[in-house]
Amino acid sequence: MTILLSTLNARYTHASLGLRYLLANMGELQGVTRLQEFVIGAKTADVVERLLTHSPRIIGFGVYIWNVEETTRVVALLKHVAPQVTIVLGGPEVSYEPQEQQIVQLADYLVTGWGDITFPQLCRQILNGPKPLMKIHAGVQPPLDDIALPYGLYTEQDIAHRTLYVEASRGCPFKCEFCLSSLDKTAWPFDLDKFLGELESLHARGARLFKFVDRTFNLNIKSSLRIMQFFLDKLAAHPEDPVFAHFEVVPDHLPDALKEAIRKFPPGTLQFEIGIQSFNPEVQATISRKQNNDKSADNIRWLREHSHAHLHVDLIAGLPGEDIASFAQGFDRLVALAPHEIQFGILKRLRGTPIIRHTEAFGLVFDPYPPYSILATDRIDFAAMQRLMRFARYWDLVANSGRFAHTLPAILGDAPFVNFMALSDWLYANTDATHRIALDKLAALVARWLNSRGMDRKEADALVDSDYAGQAHKARPRSEKTEKAAKADAAPQRQARHLAA
């Protein structure tokens, strides 16, 4: 009577929080329920073989934007070789617009939205009867106190080798139309004492890397301060074995009390993910995003100058109403604030999000296949959007990699967007590639480009060499701080929430 909970994670280092929530809430069925995670890129037949090793009666799959195509193949093969197995789907990718999705047509049942309570109930009906007549079951949203917390289900292997996702709250009060959290009515906090008790247990077991998936960590400052104090206490008690905490914060809400707490964190222990998305007020109004741009910029500047927090700041290209000139202006403004990383994202049409209402008015054209990236708008044509996508990829390779720290200022000059776009166009013209560019080749190309822009060849080579110190043929060794930040940033897509089944 085995029940399997499964998903294909984006990387091995990701441990599915959603599946662990389901397992924690299986009640009397927990003893016959197992967790089995895979990584995208695995051979479909191998995944199916491993799943069937347990002779399952039910398999529940968590379906996300990054794994839907591969999970569809897994479900299709399961239905061919083991039609007796009941397939239940859940997760953000299948919770909206399900009728048109092949994976939903293949599966037996679908739980939309919150699955913590509804999935176990559905399993009971499947196993014990009466057999459910409806294919689609809307997930019931219970009070958070009724949900068993999953953190004790992180294994020793998880703690030693994987990012541990935690959440002090669910939901979001903001209505940014590109985000699934815009569908939430508000944010709901878990009992803070109980939550901190779970963190205490994880820390006692050796956990040191915590990624909070809360959409707005600094919404309730009193709760934020208590959580930060928890980590500060651990840092004081174990300076030789520090923790690392990653939070997503609202950029324009950083009161003095929170600043004082942030000041106390030593280097390599704190990372903030800050969503700017756009500095254009008209674009912000179009997508229902409320943000004080001046205050946001001041707060990023303060964090950079007065804290040791690693800053990962997001911009999104392709938003309705924004042209390249507007995006470039926002990009240059953000570069001047000097965050450690700028995540140059391309708008994606997540199923269910209100962004689709702007399709006709702004000429939005999205790729029909995952991850549903924007292909063109009335302000940015297809060719220009392709250039932006290549810019984003090269920006990761050159700027966000940290491997061109000395060279990057020379690349950007006094017009960061224009100059890096020039480099991006040149790199593509000379490589016809955006992936699998060896580091030594990339370094040589960057030096050649600088020379083509008027820098003496020897000076350009010396500048690039100063970043690599003769090790261009291999990845530059990372500091402990950079390594921890990279692990925390290797998070699934933003909608990788508790909505898994």
Image (cartoon, helix red, strand yellow):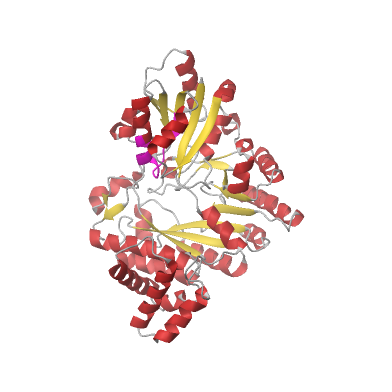
Residue 103's x, y, as percent?
A: 34, 33
368 up-or-down from 342: above or below: above
On the picture, is 22 further left or further right than 353? right
State yes or no: residue 63 in magenta: yes
389 up-or-down from 91: above or below: below
Please state which of residues 446 and 500 is positioned toward the viewer in this rendering: 446
Residue 249 appearing in the image: no
Quarter assignment of residue 484: bottom right
State yes or no: residue 200 in magenta: no
On the picture, is 345 further left or further right than 213? left
Q: How many marks?
A: 0
167 up-or-down from 112: above or below: below
Q: Residue at x 66, y 54 (%)?
A: 243
Please state which of residues 461 and 392 is positioned toward the viewer in this rendering: 461
As drawn, the residue found furthest toward the right would be 237
- The span picked out in magenta is 60-73
Residue 364's x, y, as percent?
A: 26, 52
Please state which of residues 386 and 455 is positioned toward the viewer in this rendering: 455
Residue 19's x, y, as percent?
A: 51, 35
Q: Residue at x 23, y 49 (%)?
A: 360
Residue 245 appearing in the image: yes
Residue 51's x, y, as percent?
A: 46, 30
